[in-house]
Image: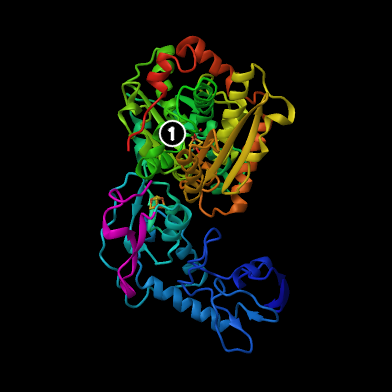
Amino acid sequence: TVKATIDGQPVEVPYGTSILDAARQAFIKIPTLCKHQDLPATAACGLCIVKLQGSGKLPRACATPLEDGMEIVTQDHELTEIRRSVIELILSNHPNECLSCGRNGNCELQSLAADFGIRQDVIKRTVRDLPCDNSNGSIVLDFRKCIKCGRCVTVCQEVQNVWALSFLERGINTRMAPAGDITLAESPCIKCGQCAAHCPTGAIVERDDVSIVWDALADPDKYCTVQIAPSVRVALGEEFGYPPGTNLTKKIYAFMRRLGFKAVFDTNFSADLTIVEEASEFVERFVHGKGELPLITSCCPSWTDFMEKKHYDFIDNFSTAKSPQQMLGVMAKTYFAKKNKIDPAKVYQVSIMPCTAKKYELERTDEMMASGFHDVDVVLTTRELARLIKQSGIDFKALPDEDADSILGEYSGAGTIFGATGGVMEAALRTAYFYVTGENLTGKAIDFESVRGLQGVKEGTIDIKGTKVRVAVAHGLGNVEAVLNKVRAAREKGEELPYHFIEVMACPGGCIGGGGQPYGVSDEVRRQRIAGLYADDRDCAVRFSHENPEIKRIYAEFLEKPLSHRAHELLHTNYTP
Ligand code: HC1
Ligand code: SF4
């Protein structure tokens, strides 16, 4: 460890800790725009300069490790003035459009301008006239609002390993953009939204579809229905002052009904449906030898997009089961509509997701119209839902708890953990175990601890009555290649496969860390959101997807059995390179 003082307070931190992090531990917040908790320092903005006593130096706190005996001053009149100048300099190249910006009220630059009391508009503002890139249906790039912090480039290249974004041009004209100055749609972007989640300003935001939902609700010819993804329920509260991980499922249902939705469904229900199909698929491949192993999960649309673009040698390994979002959409417009004698052409399906890529998934292939209509009509991210709630004037925090509608609404604990990395694997194994042995796991054996947690790649071996199933879970696309390469190497050498089943989620932490979730994510926040989902699992009376009474009913009344002809037509899809 090293011992030093920060603003007179003694601190002791592990060797290599930056001054910025050391100060945080002493409850001192040094302002920064370029450093994000998730990402390495780029030392780009210069806001975090501090004084190193006795040296006359002004090191950047984000990129300078604390050393023994240092006396650091983080705040005085002079530092405040320097920081104010830095902010003014950034503002001099930034459009003055806060009122109409997607980050209004939630922008790190705006907050700093407020905190530092910037009262006069900067004398000379030069903003380059660059058009927005709206080419991609999930993410919008407004280059004029870029402050060159580099967070988006770092997350896209180093965390996600996609390399859709890079820095273009030099000097004062430097800006982030799709590499090669093509459009985002032409780029390898897989729409994960991690760039938007890490951008400090409005330079990268989700496409805002809130007004589409208002229009649909006002349309007397539409029968509006809604589904809520697993991870939304434990993150939405952050927009209303609840701690991360607070489970607001029942308030969200109540809100949706008051807003005018005629039926309130839960993606957790269809997560159970996905598991029944996918676990059956696993058993077909693993026990009966019908199909490629390892089976790879496919419910994350950024991952399927990435696989099709970069790892298409694994197409036959992908589960053909559609994602829960798409399964719910098709069930709403077939089974639900029929049962309730509603014209399926009038059923309108809104989907609330933590994810920007879900906006793309609904039109991925023709198979996303298995009902004869768009199975899902529009996707709002958690952040958009928060805006919808605020626009509605409904006092969200005061709402009573309500339940979902009685079909397509009930869920098991296995359905809810889909939102956390490892959750899909765990849910599938619980059901696969039953399909192979005819018995349900009991007690502690229901929890597959080896696939839980935030480690980038998790491996485990599950014993199904003497048969060993080897599994791997990767989250954050940058962690995928190592796992796939192990499989490739074994294939080439004709060796035994390292895994039989692999789960991949594009975003760090899984959907709870999705690109459409409330801002300010860190591993601490991810852990709290995950804890919220596992608590929901523990509290569920039913812990297995195949035991969900509504799932049983939908097979008895409509789908017949897992992997039936009808299930294949409605609930499965395919992939193309
Ligand atoms: Fe997800 Fe999924 S878990 S992909 O992470 O399979 O987005 O939450 O809704 O569809 O259920 C996201 C979350 C979500 C689907 C499910
Ligand atoms: Fe990169 Fe994801 Fe942003 Fe696309 S959405 S540019 S892949 S970080």
**Residue placed at 64% from the left, 18% from the top?**
437
Q: Mark 1 points at which residue?
A: 351
* Residue 519 placement (x, y as % from top left): 51, 53
Query: Label 1 sits on what residue type?
Result: Ser
**Residue 336 part of the magenta segment:** no
Q: Which of 121 and 195 is in front in this view?
A: 195
Q: Position of residue 268 (x, y in %)?
A: 54, 29
Q: Residue at x 63, y 86 (%)?
A: 53
Identify which residue, 362 or 494, lies in the foreground: 494
Q: Which residue is drawn at 40% across and 19% down?
A: 568
Q: Give the range drawn in magenta.
A: 163-190
Left or right of 194 in this view: 59: right
Q: Establish if 558 lies above or below 396.
A: above
Q: Which image quarter holds the N terminus?
A: bottom right
* 104, above or below 284, in the image: below
The quadrant in which residue 124 appears is: bottom left
Total numbered circles: 1
Locate residue 506, reporting x and y percent.
Answer: 47, 45
Q: Which residue is drawn at 48% across and 10% down?
A: 557
Q: Give the percent coordinates (x, y) of residue 398.
A: 59, 39
